[in-house]
């Protein structure tokens, strides 16, 4: 039933998709512009490096051959690109200043982008809660300003936890699958994707009740984190199962949308994916805490004790 209620709440909050879309586009465009200001000069300084020039020349020749229908020398091209790439890595290792500074700057930009995305998710969660609680169509900008202190605190706490967890998972899986087990490359990539999905499900399970506990449950940001991490709402396995399976579905949905529309549909599917997960979090929290909520303007989901009383309950005055 929670999946069904999640879909109904998502449909009822569909207009939030466009509000979140505008916000995400602003954040992404600014971060892309700042990243380009770092990456373009970095590659510009590599123009005089022989190995860098050789890689692009080989790629250009391979592309021309493909367009001409010639597939014969592709293996040679791959060997040339690999050899020059290894030489380029050695060059960068011996001249690390530009690479290190550029990498640090890009990581900082990525963290700032994720911080503002977290603020946007908090705001979207507040809009969903208003709709579920009283069918109110709140303003995105007004809600963002009203909740700015709490949303920033939430993002400041969530960001390092999520970032460190993701980095540790990637490094451990890389060392095990690519460096330790020496598996065929396609099998290693497949297992890497599978285990990352499972591990992302674990992270989302432990943070699933955080936003609803703060927004709907009126807890502090730290109190909401404790409530969510300790899984006081219960149903850990079903919550984990939902997030693990949803991660697969969302990846497939966005990839198919990108391929089928040459990337255009991602404008809608990406914010819709965020909203889908947020809707489930609020539905799960309300069900676990027996809180009434709207799934649409005509339907209210009530806890069992608030449903029509039985004859015995009526006679007892319950």
Image (tube, rainbow, N blue to C red):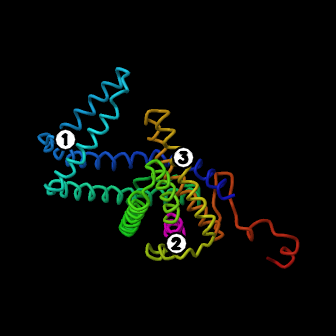
Looking at the image, is mark 2 or mark 1 earlier in the sequence? 1
Looking at the image, is mark 3 or mark 2 earlier in the sequence? 3
**Could you tell me residue 47's position as x and y percent?**
14, 40
Quick one: SS at disc 2? helix
Say if 310 sits above or below 63 in the image: below
Residue for badge 1: 52
Residue 279 vs residue 98: left or right?
right
**Could you tell me residue 51's position as x and y percent?**
18, 42
Residue 278 vs residue 57: left or right?
right
Say if 175 sits above or below 61 in the image: below
Looking at the image, is mark 1 or mark 3 earlier in the sequence? 3
Residue for badge 3: 14
Estimate how packed mark 3 is, as few (under 14), some (14 to 19) or many (20 or more) residues with alpha carbons within 10 Å: some
Asked if residue 237 shows in the view, the reply is yes
Give the alpha-carbon distance from disc 2 to disc 1, as whole Å.
49 Å
Residue for badge 2: 228
* The disc label shown at residue 22, or none: none
Q: Quadrant of residue 170?
A: bottom left
């Amino acid at each position: 039933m929670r999946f069904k209620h999640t879909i109904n709440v998502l449909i009822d909050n569909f207009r939030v998709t466009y509000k979140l879309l505008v916000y995400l586009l602003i954040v992404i465009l600014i971060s892309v512009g700042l990243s380009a200001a770092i990456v373009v000069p970095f590659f510009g300084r590599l123009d005089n490096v022989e190995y860098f020039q050789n890689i692009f020349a080989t790629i250009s020749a391979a592309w021309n051959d493909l367009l001409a229908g010639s597939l014969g020398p592709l293996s040679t091209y791959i060997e040339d690109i690999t050899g020059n790439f290894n030489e380029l890595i050695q060059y960068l290792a011996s001249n690390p200043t530009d690479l290190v500074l550029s990498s640090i700057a890009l990581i900082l930009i990525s963290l700032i982008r994720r911080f503002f995305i977290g603020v946007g998710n908090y705001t979207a969660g507040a809009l969903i809660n208003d709709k579920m609680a009283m069918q109110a169509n709140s303003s995105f900008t007004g809600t963002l300003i009203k909740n700015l202190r709490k949303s920033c605190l939430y993002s400041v706490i969530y960001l390092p936890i999520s970032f460190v967890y993701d980095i540790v998972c990637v490094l451990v899986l890389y060392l095990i699958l690519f460096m330790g087990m020496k598996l065929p490359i396609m099998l290693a990539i497949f297992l890497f994707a599978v285990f990352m999905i499972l591990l992302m499900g674990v992270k989302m399970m432990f943070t699933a009740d955080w936003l609803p506990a703060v927004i709907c449950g009126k807890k502090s940001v730290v109190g909401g984190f404790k409530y969510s991490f300790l899984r006081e709402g219960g149903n850990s396995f079903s919550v984990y199962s939902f997030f693990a399976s949803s991660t697969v579905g969302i990846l497939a949905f966005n990839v198919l949308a990108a391929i089928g529309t040459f990337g255009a549909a991602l404008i809608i599917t990406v914010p819709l994916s965020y909203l889908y997960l947020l809707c489930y979090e609020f539905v799960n929290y309300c069900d676990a805490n027996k809180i009434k909520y709207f799934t649409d303007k005509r339907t209210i989901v009530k806890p069992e004790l608030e449903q029509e009383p039985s004859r015995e309950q009526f006679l007892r005055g319950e």
